[in-house]
Amino acid sequence: MSVFTSTFQALGITLRNLTRKPNTVMHPFVKRERSARYRQTFALLHEANGDEACIGCKKCEKICPSEVITVVASKHESAITGKKRGWAEDFNLDLTACIVCELCVQVCPVDAIVMCSVPTKPSFAREDLLLTMSLLYANESIPRAPYTGTSLVESHAPDRGVEKTPAEKSPAETPPA
Amino acid sequence: MKLLFDNPVLHALVMGVALSSAVLGVTSYFIWWERKFAGRMQGRVGPKHVGFKGLLQPIADAFKLLIKEDIIPRDADRAMFDLAPLLAVIVGLLSLAVIPLASGLVISDLDVGVLFFLAVGAMSVLPTWMAGWASNNKFALLGGMRAVAQSVAYGVPMVLAVVVPVLLARSMNLTDIVAAQSGGRWFIWWPLGPGLVAGILFLLASLAEGNRIPFDIPEAESELVSGVSTEYTGMKFGMFYLAEYLHSLVGSAVFVTLFLGGFDGPGPDVMALQATWFVLKTALVSTALLWVRWTLLRVRSDQLMSLCWKWLLPAGLIVVMAAAVWTRFSPGTAP
Amino acid sequence: MALSTVTQNLVSLVRANPHLDIESYEPDADLMVLNMGPQHPSTHGVLRVKLYLDGEVVVKAVPYLGYLHRGVEKLLEKLTYVMSTPIVDKNDYVSAMTNELALVMAFEKLEGCEVPRRARYLRTICAELQRVASHLLWLGTFALDMGGALGGGTSVFMYCFRERELILDVFEELTGARFHYNFHQVGGVRHDPAPGWDKSVHQVAAKIAARIPEYERMLAENPIFRVRTRGVGRIDPVLAQELGLSGPNLRACGIDWDLRKQRPYAAYDEIEVRTVTAREGDAYARFMVRLAEMKESLRIATELVSGLPEGPIMGRKPIETPNAVKPPAGEAYSAIESPRGELGTYVVSDGTPKPYRCKIRPPSYHALSALPYLLPGTTIPDVVVILGSLDPIMGEADR
């Protein structure tokens, strides 16, 4: 008899699921909500004064495990501030081989490269996924994932969150995230 | 039986062609219904984009299968390889010849209708085995061998189960069997006991003959890739696919005829209404079989055989004896 | 099943010595050689099992590995310590958190740095949630093997994945990625949870815990499931220990060995881990052990997340360059309890920022080595069930 009862129990569960709302998200007509930290594609940023932030230090190129970043660096004066500093003449990121590990963001000393929280649109042309410098700077306007190099490294501070005496606290110190 | 034309051959021809086409069309949409139903049971929607609610999906699938390349393995036995899918569909459609859709509306009112149905059912193992052998593929061969064992074994409980309505109606003519169930006295619940057990036996045997889960070992996809139809591509595979659903539909139709009263239902004896009752009952039984399919797991082949010989066969014998005793001694029936 | 005497003799011989060369021993045994895989719907990745069959009964089975070999250990010698965590994510691609944890703990042992308490708690919570996600995937594919792609197996598969999505959403909230997170780093973790994360964990754990009884009713008490898995693939405890089996495969044989209890790491010394064992050692026992582990992992995760301590998430200087981690010369081995068993990393350092040798000890490799012992005498459907119940992931078996 237990053969029949357990079979009917199993049948009951599938019947019960018939009445539940389906889990399907009608992509791409409906956009599935991503979390705020979702990281997918990249953007290069400008500084507040309009200069390109990237100084061509090539730390991201060295740390990338998949070697997808290629930077051609140079040094010259800035047209806006007049000071001599490093620049990236060419910056190429091969999104087809990127493993989305966020290490390049972590090591950037000037917060030039950040990740964006918008899923990459599928495309028929390979060129759309080989991010050139213009494409990367164009991504500056799309929604970004919250972490930059400095904010990520700051959250790793080994003494973060340790109770400090009032004398040690500076007015600009924010509580831990 | 009502003849559409004066000539019975012409009647059979025209009605046969009409019914076959209708049933093949219905089978394609049965596939649509299954995908929607199964999808909802699994927390997803079925086909949705092709046509309104995915209703054009079967047509799109048929078109896709037609334009696919027909790959034939090098050392395949060509004659059997090409014939197997055709035979599968033909054998599936043959049983339709004796099923009464409404009172008087039947292609061929055979006096041995039940025997005809059983013979056709026994033949249905042939295309499966042919495909398994002719494919020159070890996986397909295993599937074919399992199919032969399974079909031959489950033919026995099926015959026994079918004997019960024959005894209760005292005729092998399917129209007479339906007439004996008129007025709501369907064999599934009257007399209580033999009819119900025989109905369950028939359903299990029909699932096994049709290689449906929980008895789909011959086409066990997770072990044998695709079983007997591994080497088939394009429309030949489409025909196997169609034949499977056809078998399921026709099996449900026969179950409805033998146990659920056929076209019997409340309301006046109008042909259209009776046909509607028949179609409704068949749809319900098919959906119930779908529900079972998408819930249960597969039984292993040796467990399947032991289920048949150790449980279904004795149950069948007992139920036949019970039906015989009832028929002999029940009041109001002449011996 | 009725076997001929020749086959019966062969089967008992092969059971005693799985590497017996049948072709030369008994040339007229008339056995059919069937290659199951590497392309096959249910070999859990690219695994090839060469089966010698008599009808449907397996007389000898030879597994062939290496179809998914990607040179991970060689790659780890080329990359620095800092860059290697996203690579090992892809070993056991189904449970990435545990891979990273195993690697990073070995590096920390080399360097001798201590991990702060908050980071240890986060590591444990993520490892336990990952265990649930991995077991859900295993359950779905196990049912799929038995019920087929067009049948009841798919229903269970869809339900399991529906639950797994909830866990992946929790991980996305924490790290920004769903499958391969790069969450661990030498000295701690990289992402600090946002304030609402612990609520998400509680909600998800409650939802999944409510659904596990459904799986029990649909599978554990299902007569077809029981008849397919009971008595199938019985592993003798002595054989299990000889082969180096670990994790649920070992606990289902009755041996209570769990690295979380016996060799606690991360935050496991601050919480009680109630492991489950079974006596029979067959596929059904392994299923029951994994099902119970799911419930236990949910409990551990919710308890730890309620008591998540404040503090830093890194125990050493933040990593800002590729060569930031430069441990002294030496060697270290560190093992954790991954969902599949003991996942170990053995690393040898020569003082440079790149490891000299990094060997990964995958539990699936040892689980697969049991196949030549388990398969002779069974039928083909049983092969699929046994393979599924051992839960191998070819990515980590081949690396």
Image: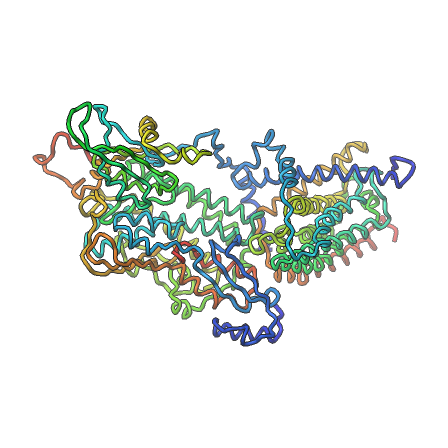
Query: Picture coordinates of residue C64 (x, y %)?
Result: 47, 62
Question: Eyeballing the image, is B285 above or below A91?
Answer: below
Q: For residue C52, which quarter of the picture?
A: bottom right
Give percent across and percent down for residue A76.
19, 30
Instruction: Look at the picture and state if B268 lies above or below C167.
Output: above
What x and y, as percent, mark residue C84? 29, 50
Looking at the image, is C316 positioned above or below residue B147?
above
Q: Residue at x 89, y 40 (%)?
A: B8
**Colouring style:** rainbow
Specify whether B316 is left or right of A6: right
Furthest residue in direction left, as rendered? A167
C337, A5: nearer the viewer: C337
Can residue B197 be seen here? no
Number of numbered discs on residues: 0
Q: Is residue B96 left or right of residue B64?
A: right
Q: Quadrant of the N terminus of chain B?
A: top right
Residue A101 seen in the figure: yes
- Depth check: give the residue in front, C187 or C76: C76
Seen in the picture, residue C53 relative to A92 is either above or below; the reply is below
Relative placement, left or right, of C134 versus B332 is left
Instruction: Single out the residue that lies furthest toward the right.
Output: B6
Where residue C294 appears, as percent x and y from the top left, is 40, 51
